[in-house]
Image (cartoon, coloured by chain):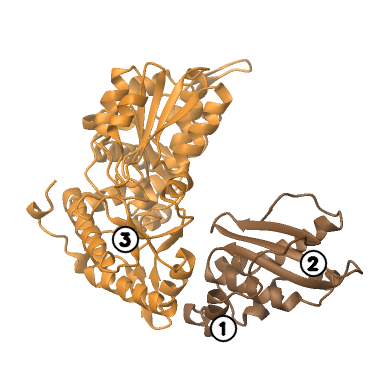
Chain colours: A brown, B orange
């Protein structure tokens, strides 16, 4: 189990201070938002798909919350660029942990997976497989 | 109560009763500052639980055998003990054991509220209510078409009593107020609120979850109609708390739960209710927990509640002073010499959950979040705060450890 100092390695703090792909994309293929109600973390993700409606061409996020949620979102946007929506759907919580490169304490896992979950729900809505206004993490 | 007039607690000796405080994580001894969430359990209380199960355990009130008689007497006397502890002269008849403060609120909201409230009635709460009170009254009011109104919290984190005076009217049927705020540490003038309620023929429910553990409480002096508290926040076990109610009100009220133990006589068509307080304790009650809670009250009374309060105030004032040394730290609630033993704060640029994680790395246990007061946090303009809360075994050195860990967090995020 990672301890606090592990959790706040330079790479994470660097992404927190200088988030990649932060902002809004005009006219995205889909956009979706979500929150951790217990923490108050909020993330919105915009995705632009290529003409095949499958390849992720561009991703942006904006949000507010703890370092883990915001750094994870930043790393996530870099990671999924160029992947397909199917590949996005296959990502799970272990992938979010791998991106962060640290073990995080059980109570903080929901912070780390928020961006991934928001993007996946956004894609499901885009494909007509889901109908929600906002993604919320459980417990 | 002046903190200067009482003999300080012998904290070093008290700590010997709490072996959990010796635990280490990665070489750091735990600094337990999450007492507003739950307090640790001293050896005499743990012994009481163990001895109950080793020597006395039986179901109460239905056995003719020795063990059941002993268990029944111990359980009944625990009610008298807790009644006395909060200043209720009516002994067990005015002290119902519940799962805790939340269940006590639900008990009154359902058993009294559903029957007595109707459309056009008002329930007056404060903006600093815990969700246990806020959500319960909000939902019961919705069921009966009553309205909930909120007494404002001033910018200095104290209750706006003038606003209470405006809000409490002939339409008010119930005032439900927290005695000590679990987020702001503010101590509310509940006696004054009780007078306001009674002037308008309304009842008052006082949530004493943070008050009974931290100061002498006298429900009759306050003139509370109902007063609730939780055992695990006052050195007792989890799963037990108390609801004080004025005898005539408890007598008039319908039961909350139906079942065994709460009945006197049952036919196929009808049933009559048992005496107080058993009418409100359906099913096999929390016997071991109740007996252990009584031991917790003994422990606290041996320390002296005025000394407990003085220690709480000293800890809060010291923490407040140390925290406000940092320019980038905001402390919520009234100033240091006018609060209960907790401080909620935020640090610019460090999210409360990040802070709690880094503090945990130093084995400093605090709480980060909305502390079950989301509407209050919305008013404060923050999603989450960090909260350090103190109890009888905490030391100034532990506050220093908190400050040291906070400084580490500030540097990580600098």
Confirm whether circles 1 and 2 share one chain: yes
SS for dot 3 = loop
Q: Alpha-carbon distance for marks 2 and 3?
A: 60 Å
Gap between marks 3 and 1 measured at Cα: 44 Å
Q: Chain of mark 2?
A: A
B369 left or right, relative to A95:
left
**CB under 8 Å between callouts 1 and 2?**
no
Left or right relative to B275: residue B200? left
Looking at the image, is mark 1 or mark 2 nearer the viewer?
2
Above or below, A13 relative to B13: below
Could you tell me which chain the residue with mark 3 belongs to?
B
Q: Is residue B213 left or right of residue B373?
A: left
Residue B226 pos. (x, y %): 35, 30
Q: Report the front residue among B63 and A71.
A: A71
Where, quadrant-wise, is the C terminus of chain B in this rendering? bottom left
Mark positioned earlier in the residue sequence (1 or 2): 1
Point 40% across, 21% down: residue: B172
Mark-to-mark CA distance, 1 and 2: 27 Å
**Label 2 Cα neighbours within 10 Å, binned few <14 / some 14-19 / many ≥20:** many
Bin the neighbour count of mark 3 within 10 Å (Cα to Cα): few under 14, some 14-19, many 20 and up: many
Chain label for disc 1: A
Name the residue beneath numbered marker 2: A48
Q: How many marks?
A: 3
| x, y percent for residue B53 | 43, 54
* Residue behind mark 3: B42
At mark 1, the secondary structure is helix
Which residue in the structure is indicated by mark 1?
A11
Q: Nearer the viewer, residue A98 or A28?
A: A28
């Amino acid at each position: 189990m990672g301890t606090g100092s592990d959790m706040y390695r330079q790479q994470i703090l660097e992404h927190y201070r200088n988030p990649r792909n932060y902002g809004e994309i005009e006219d995205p293929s889909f956009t979706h938002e979500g929150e951790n109600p217990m923490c108050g973390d909020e993330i919105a993700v915009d995705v632009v798909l290529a003409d095949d409606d499958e390849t992720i061409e561009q991703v942006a996020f904006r949000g507010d919350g703890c370092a883990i949620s915001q750094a994870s979102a930043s790393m996530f946007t870099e990671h999924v660029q160029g992947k397909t929506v199917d590949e996005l759907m296959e990502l799970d919580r272990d992938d979010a942990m791998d991106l962060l490169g640290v073990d995080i304490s059980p109570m903080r896992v929901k912070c780390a997976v928020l961006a991934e979950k928001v993007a996946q729900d956004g894609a499901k809505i885009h494909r007509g497989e889901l109908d929600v206004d906002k993604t919320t993490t459980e417990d | 109560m002046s903190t200067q007039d009482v003999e300080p607690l012998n904290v070093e000796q008290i700590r010997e009763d709490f072996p959990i405080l010796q635990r280490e994580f990665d070489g750091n001894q735990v600094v337990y500052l999450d007492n507003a969430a739950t307090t640790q359990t001293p050896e005499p209380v743990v012994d009481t639980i163990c001895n109950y199960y080793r020597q006395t355990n039986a179901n109460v009130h239905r056995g003719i055998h020795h063990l059941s008689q002993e268990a029944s007497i111990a359980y009944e006397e625990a009610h008298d003990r807790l009644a006395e502890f909060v200043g209720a002269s009516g002994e067990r008849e005015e002290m119902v054991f519940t799962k805790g403060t939340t269940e006590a609120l639900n008990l009154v909201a359902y058993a009294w509220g559903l029957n007595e409230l109707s459309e056009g009635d008002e329930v007056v709460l404060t903006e600093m209510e815990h969700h246990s009170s806020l959500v319960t009254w909000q939902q019961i009011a919705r069921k009966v078409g009553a309205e909930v109104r909120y007494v404002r919290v001033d910018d200095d984190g104290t209750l706006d009593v003038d606003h209470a005076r405006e809000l409490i009217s002939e339409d008010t049927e119930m005032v439900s107020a927290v005695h000590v705020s679990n987020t702001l540490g503010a101590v509310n003038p509940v006696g004054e609120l009780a007078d306001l309620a009674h002037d308008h023929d309304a009842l008052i429910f006082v949530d004493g979850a943070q008050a009974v553990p931290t100061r002498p409480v006298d429900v009759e002096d306050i003139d509370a109609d109902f007063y609730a508290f939780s055992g695990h926040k006052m050195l007792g076990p989890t799963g037990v708390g108390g609801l004080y109610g004025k005898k005539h009100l408890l007598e008039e009220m319908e039961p909350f739960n139906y079942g065994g133990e709460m009945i006197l006589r049952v036919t196929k068509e009808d049933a009559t209710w048992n005496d107080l307080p058993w009418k409100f304790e359906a099913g096999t009650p929390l016997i071991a927990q109740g007996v252990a809670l009584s031991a917790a009250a003994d422990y606290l009374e041996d320390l002296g509640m005025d000394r407990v309060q003085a220690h709480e105030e000293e800890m809060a004032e010291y923490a407040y002073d140390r925290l406000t040394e940092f320019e980038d730290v905001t402390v919520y609630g009234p100033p240091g010499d006018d609060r209960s033993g907790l401080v909620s704060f935020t640090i610019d640029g460090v999210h409360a959950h990040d802070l709690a994680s880094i503090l945990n790395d130093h084995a400093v246990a605090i709480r980060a979040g909305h502390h079950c007061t989301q509407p209050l946090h919305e008013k404060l303009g923050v999603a989450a705060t960090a909260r350090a809360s103190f109890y009888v075994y905490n030391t100034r050195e532990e506050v220093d450890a908190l400050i040291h860990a906070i400084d580490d967090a500030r540097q990580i995020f600098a």
